[in-house]
Structure formats: structure tokens, C-alpha cells
Amino acid sequence: MTEYIVLSAILFTIGCVGVLVRRNAIVVFMCVELMLNACNLAFVAFARQHGNLDGQITAFFVMVVAAAEVVIGLAIIMTIFRTRRSASVDDASLLKY
Amino acid sequence: MAEGAHAPVVAPDTGAGGVFELLWLVIALPLLGAVLLLAVAPFLPGSARAAVDRHGHLLGTATAVASFGLSLVLFLSLLGRDAEERQVGQHLWTWFETGSLDVGMDLLYDQLAALFLLLITGVGSLIHVYAIGYMAHDPRRRRFFGYLNLFVAAMLTLILSANFVGLFLGWEGVGLASYLLIGFWQHKPSAAAAAKKAFVINRVGDIGLSLAIALMFATFGTTDFGDVSAHTGEASQGTLTALGLLLLLGACGKSAQVPLQAWLLDAMEGPTPVSALIHAATMVTAGVYLVVRSNFIFELAPVAQTAVVVVATVTLLWGAILGCAKDDIKKALAGSTMSQIGYMMLAAGLGPVGYPFAIFHLLTHGFFKANMFLGAGSVMHGMDDDVDMRHYGALNKAMPVTFLTFAMGYLAIIGFPGFSGFWSKDKIIESALAENLLVGVLAVLGAGITAFYMTRLMLLTFFTSRRWEEGVHPHESPRVMTVPLVVLAALSVLGGVLLLGDWIVTWLEPVTGHAEHHEPPLPAIAITLLITAVVALGVAAAWFLVGRREVPREAPREVSFATRAARADLYGDAINDALVVRPGTGLVGGLTLFDRVGVDGAVEGGSAAVGGLSSTMRRVQNGFVRSYALSLLGGALLVVLALLAVNLG
């Protein structure tokens, strides 16, 4: 049981650090997915521990939201790449003070 | 106040009928003239308007004369009634009614009002006639006559009103008319400033009167002369004293008594007929009327009566001293007006003994002072509007009618035996001596100073050497100006007949109350001789100091302190400045500063702080997604830590 949670924490931390340090939008995006799946793992593990289906249902919800998010997110990244010739998240910094 | 003394209750007979039904017309006629000349005429089409501009003065004069005719008829009818039935009232309409307050447009025509009506409409008509000539070349003559009519209507409202609220309406009306007429030549900055000054100082007095009216409402629930006079006995001493002092403040403002005297000399900026009508014969005496009319209050407030006497004594000397040093003929006369009103106030402050003489002197003063002001106007007319007496000299040949009529006024004011002023001033001084020796002696002194400055004025203007320049051609004024002068001169000489058989005392007794006569310290004839001797001394002093010497065309600069002080109006303006204006300006400056620094500072500082903070804070929005993610993470961590701390701790 603990192993699942530890794995989930490790995956989440990797994703989190990836989001913070990487510039490439695609990589950042993949790291976000990694964090979501780390959460899913934790949900499923806890559902198993408690012996009910709440966590598993939530995991399904997360997957659906993640799928929708991928569709929109990738579309945005592609559009930005087309206009700016770059996929770096630091270059898309016009929306500021 | 004598034990048990109570002023007569005002109880007008409202159903007199007959000619008394026309009482309202006395006010309505000049008011109609004012409305036509001021409110209707400007909206007429071109040619009709030009006709009104050309002939409007005739309309204005006609309404005044008609009003005088009606007053005369009313007076004769009143004479025909029994002494007990000489108070006639007329209820016109209810002015306003709210809760327990009920103020009616009521008129009261009694012995006091009758005399005032004759003075106002009579002298007023003469001055209207005179002004036809005096203002002949003024392009705004129609407006001038409109203002004059407005003044007469307001003054009549003041006198005829049967309650203090109506009196206040007239009081403010004459204030307005006075303001408009002092500033009639508004293109002169000095005239505009003088009008403003008169208006502002009068406001101070008006505060006193309006507070007195409010206090009357609070105490008696009414301001009707009849109801108030019937219930003064029930009010507390403190209330009555406060009422008396507040009324005195009002009277001081309108009658230019110390300490609100500073406006009168500047008011001479107005056209001379205005000075004669408003600032000598009628409006400035409204304060005396107020005190005499409120006798039912003053009778029960001895402190207020004493205050009246003190104010009056100071003013009569103050005005006389000013009159001695002024070279401007109108200002010298204005100082004299102030001083003579001081005499009237003095008499009014003495109680029932003095009231009839206050009114008597008011009437005779109305005649001779109007006469002299109009005479001064006639002199100015002939001297190209020069007012400096040092530029006159030896005008008695050039203007014989003006000189002779002026001389009648002069003899009346100094109290030459037989002339009107002699009788009226003599009676006042006699009563004053009987009441209080010091006040009486000061009044005698005032008579001496009066003789001095009036003789000086007379000598500088009509005698001594000729000092006018080449190119000035003094000439007699047209008939339309000299006829009123002659009539007024006759009245100045003969005004004393009112005292025949103590007529005026008996006539006014139902209004002012019966007087307990105190025996003066000297027999009456001795007092008369004493006054005449002091007057002769004043005349002689003027002859030695002015008449025998060469008069310089320019006022000498090396003069004594006393002369300098008198020339500066005894520092009246400086005192006002130091006591009122400068502290007021300082207070306002302080408040402005507090408003700017304190209130504005807090508000503007607050908004500046928020603005500054937000412009610093917006730097956080740097556009880098990763830094947003970092703060998001930090926030999430904080929340988790907080939850942990709460749950575990």
C-alpha cells in the first residue's frame, strides 16, 4: 500500500518539477499529465484501501478532464507555434502588466 | 423702570371701515410703480420701452405723491376719531400658517405709523420730484425711480406691518433698496464696494432682529404687536433682556449706531437723493422706530434700555467727531446724521419720557437733513459733481436759493432758537439730564460739536474765499430741484409746531405709554440757555478756526492725531478689520488649510497609497507561465501546511 503512495508522490514531484523548470510547452504539458496520473494512482490506491469505488470514479473523471484538456491545450500550443515559431512557454509572455 | 409700569397694549380696531379700508393702497401704489418700472418695462417692445425710459420718472413720482395724498387723508381721518380709537388694523391675508404658527399680512395704522407715513411719503415725494432734475441726464433714470419706489413701498411695509415678521419683510426690503441705490453707479468700484459694505454690515444687524423674532415665536408663540404687548409680563426677565438686546443689535445695523456704524459714510457713494431719502430721512431711522415700537419689550428690560442709551451716547459723539474732520460735504452730513440718530436713540432709550421726543426729533431731522442733503446735491450739481468742500467757498452769491434753504436747515440742526431742531433737541437733552447727568452733559457737548461742524460746513461751502477753479461755473439748480428745497426749508423752520401744547406727546401717549416726569437738575429755561450757550460756543469756535483763516485747497497733511483719527472714521474700519475681518479671514484660512491638508490629504493620500501599492503589485503579473505555476505551487503548499497545522495542532 505504502509503495503505491510513495510511487504516486515521486511521479507527482517529477511532474511538478518538470512544469516549473522546463520551457518546452509540449514537455510541460506531458509533465502536467504525469501529475494528473500520479493523482489517479493515489485515488485508486486509496479506493482499494477503503474498499469503496469513490476514488476509482474520481480517477475516471480526471481522465475525462485530462483528455479534454489535451485537446484544447495541444490546439493552443500548435497555434502559438504557428504564429511565433517557438514552443517555449517563456516566449508567450505578452499577457502581463 | 417704574414700579408697576406697563406699556400700553396694542389692540387695533380691525373694523374701522371707511377710508381706512384703503390702507393697503399706501403700500400698493409705490409697489405698483416699482413693478411697472423694474419688472414690466424691460419686457416691453422697443418703442413702448423707450417711452417708459423717457417718462418713467413721472410714473414713479406720481405713485409717491398719490401715496402721500392717501396718507394725508388717512391722517386727517385718524385725527377725526376719538383718542382711544386711533389704532386701526387691517387684515389682508394669512401669510403662512403652520402648526401653532400663524402669521398674517396685517397692517396696523396708529398714531406712530401715521406720523411715519406722512414723513416717508411726504419727504419721499419731494425727493422724487427733486430727483427728476438731479437724475435728468442719467441714462438709467427709469431704473432709479423704480428702485426709489421699491424703497418707499418697503419702508411703508416696515412701518405699517402689525407683526414683527411683516416688519422684517419691510426691513429687508429697505436693505435691498439701499444696496441697489448705493451701488446705483456700479461702474465706480468705490460705489460697488460701498453697497457691498452696507449690505454686509446690515446683515449683522439683521441677524439680531431675526433672532429676536425667533425668540418671540419661542416665548409668545406669535410676533403680533398686540399679542406680544399683552403677554410681555409673563416672560422671564432674561428673555426680555435678550429680546431687547437683539432688537438693539438690529437697530444698530439699520441706524448706523456704534458698533455697526461703518457703512453709513461709505453709503454716500449713492446718488444724493438716495442719501437724502434713505440715509438721512427715513431708512436709517428705522432703528429708532423699532425701539419705540417695541416699547412694550424695552419697558420691562431695563438692562436693554441702558444698553440703548450707552450705544446712543457713544454714537452721537462718534458721529459728531467724524463730522468735524470730513472735507467731503456728503460725508460730513452723514456723520451728522449718525450723530442725530444717536440723539433719537438716546431719547428712545429713556423710556416713555423720551419716546415722543425721539419721534419728534426724527421728524424734524427728516425735514432739515433731507433739506441739507438735497442742498448739498444742488451744490454738487452746480460744481460739476465735486464733493470736496475745500473746492467750494463763497457760493452764497452763485446759488442764492440753495444757500437760503440750506441756511434754514443749518439753523434747525444746530438748534437756533425757534427753529425745529431747537425744540426737538432741547427736549431730548432735557429728558436726558433728568435721567442721568453724565449722559445729559455728553448730549450737551454733542450739541456744541454739532454747532461746530455744521458751521464749518456752512462756512467752507457758502462763505470764505472763492476757491473753485477756472472753468467751473457754479449756477443755481433748475426749479424742479429748488422747489422741494424751499418746501423742506419751510418745514425745517416750522417743524417745531408739532410741540405746540405738547401735541406730539399727547398724540403718541396711547402708543408709548404715560411718562412719569423726573424733575431735571436745572429749571427747563436754564437748560435751554445752557444748550444755546454751548451751541454759540461751537459756532464761535468754527468761526475762529475756519471762517477767519485762509482755507487751503488741499487738506493739510500736518495735522494733530485727533484730526487724523477723525478723518479715518475714528478707525472704525480698522477696528472692524482687527476684530472681525482679520480673525474671520484667519479662521477661514485655517479651515481651508485643514480641508486641504487634513481632509484632502487623507482622501488623496489614501488613493495615492492604493495606487502606489497596486503599481508595485502588478509587477507580479510578469507574463511568465512558469512563475505563475511556482506561486500556485507555493499557495497549494501553504494551504496543505495550514490544514496540517490545524488538524495536527
Image: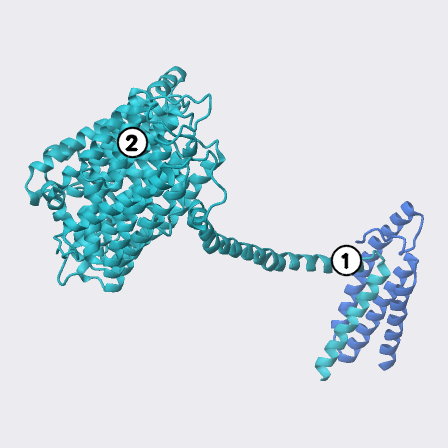
Chain colours: A blue, B cyan
Percent x, y for residue B198?
Answer: 40, 43
Quarter the C terminus of chain B occupies = bottom right
Q: Which residue is mark 2?
A: B406
CA distance separating discs 1 and 2: 88 Å
Q: Residues within 10 Å of mark 2 (few under 14, many from 20)?
A: many
Percent x, y for residue B632?
Answer: 80, 65
B532 or B13: nearer the eye?
B532
Q: Which residue is mark 1?
A: B618
Q: Residues within 10 Å of mark 1 (few under 14, many from 20)?
A: few
Q: Is residue B110 left or right of residue A62?
A: left
For image coordinates 31% across by 51% down, the residue present is: B209
Q: Is residue B252 visible?
A: yes
The reply to whether dot 1 and dot 2 touch (C-beta < 8 Å) is no
Percent x, y for residue B323?
Answer: 36, 43
B419 or B263: nearer the eye?
B419
Element marked by disc 1: helix
Q: Is residue B252 left or right of residue B597?
A: left
Percent x, y for residue B141?
Answer: 38, 24
Element marked by disc 2: helix
